[in-house]
Amino acid sequence: MESAKFIYWQDGNQWLGYLQDYPDYWTQGESLEDLQANLRDLFRDLTSGEIPGIRKLAELTLR
């Protein structure tokens, strides 16, 4: 089973979050479950190859 880490928080009545590997692309939901569903949709969109110029987070080993 594939998984992805995400960052999330509640702001008033909304849940906000983004995928750790794609910090420039946020989404929201009315509940944590709704946010997770939207993050799954966002992941599919970002990894489909259909959207050009997607920015992604990476780690560089310096030594």
Image (cartoon, rainbow, N blue to C red):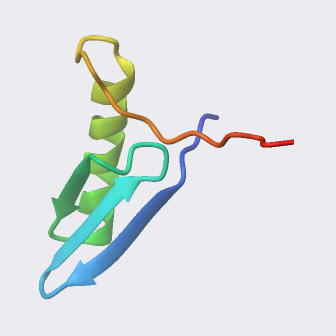
- Up/down of 18 relative to 60, above or below: below
Q: Residue at x 37, y 51 (%)?
A: 23
Camera-side residue: 34 or 52? 52
Q: Which quadrant of the rendered structure holds the N terminus?
A: top right
56 displayed left or right of 60: left
Residue furthest toward the right?
63
Q: Residue at x 31, y 27 (%)?
A: 54
Quarter of the image where one finds residue 17 = bottom left
**Image coords of residue 20 (percent x, y):** 48, 52
Quarter of the image where one finds residue 42 = top left
Q: Which quadrant of the rendered structure holds the C terminus?
A: top right
28 displayed left or right of 4: left
**Image coords of residue 59 (percent x, y):** 65, 43
**Image coords of residue 37 (percent x, y):** 30, 49
**Image coords of residue 4 (percent x, y):** 54, 45
Q: Residue at x 12, y 83 (%)?
A: 13
Residue furthest toward the front?
63
Q: Residue at x 24, y 53 (%)?
A: 26
Camera-side residue: 34 or 46? 46
